[in-house]
Image (cartoon, helix red, strand yellow):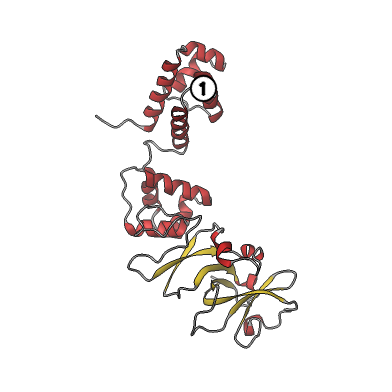
Amino acid sequence: MAELSLKQQFLRSLKAILHSSGMSRKELGSRLELSPSALSQIFNGGMLPTQQRLDRFFELLHPTVDEAEKLQDMLLWLRAGFTHYPSVFNRKLFLARCHLGMSLDALSRASDIPVNRLRRLERTAYAEPTPDEVFVLSTVLGYPLSDDPLMTYGSIPTEKPLMAAESDIVMLRRLTVEDLRKYSKDTDFLDFVSKVRHGYLSFRDLPGEAEAVLCAETSELNIRMPGVVEVVLACRRPSGFAELDLCCVGEKREFFLQDGDGKLGGDWTAGHDTHGAVIWRLPVVRMNFIPEG
């Protein structure tokens, strides 16, 4: 027997709730102020009810909480274009993408996974992602898409990302300049980083002290060369690493890099006015520069 589509399941549940209530369809239409034709379209699948109308159904028909939540959940997925009830992976992928406001095209560009493949992974319950796809998508979205600890890196709210199994890849929370403007030297950096929700970036061969990565335009760090930088930050400098710090300076909370000679930015920011006291500094353990264009 073929599996019922999501719409068929929705309509069957809706009719069952109406039947259990003892109310006739005619009476329901009258109390909803709907014409017989409009009500027929809803119960025959020609038209989906709005969330407000579904809430009114609940008020009149008194379904159980479980029945109401199931109907509401199905309506959400029907309005999102699903034809069958999504799998756990479908749901996680879809909701994680929605949380970041990413289109499928944007996710494709960020993950290097074709749009058609992403659409299949998101909307087809029997589509099985590969471990590499789970790993990449989890990294880009900043959310563990699998419960298998060998595929992902821990829960977003409380845990620091773990080193990937049998790999030298580590994932760090992504920070912005606006995030760091809210940071205070009196705040524990690990606690501060744990509350940031911009996703993760993956790196290889980082020391264990690495805790987060700042992604910024070079101009935001007062670097003269146009482009973007990824600045990997630590709470303390590992032994053997160059003395380079990210510094927050002055009342305007500008950001500069300070080298081992104590110069803010060295030649990178030559000629820039750097008046003001250093409010806080964090050790830099790696910096990747991506030129403009």
- Numbered disc 1: secondary structure: helix
Task: Look at the picture and state if 139 lies above or below 169.
Answer: above
Residue 278 in picture, x, y percent from top left: 70, 76
Q: In which quarter of the image is residue 274?
A: bottom right
Image side of residue 19 versus residue 285, left or right: left
**Residue 180, percent from left and from top:** 63, 66
Quadrant housing residue 279: bottom right
Q: Residue at x 47, y 62 (%)?
A: 160
Residue corresponding to mark 1: 57
Q: Which residue is drawn at 46% across and 59% down?
A: 140
Q: Give the amino acid type for the residue marked by disc 1 in the picture.
A: Phe
Tell me where residue 111 appears, x and y as whole percent: 42, 59
* Residue at (45% x, 63% y) in the render: 161
Counting the numbered discs, the total is: 1
- Front one among 184 and 35: 184
Of 91 and 206, the residue lying toward us = 206
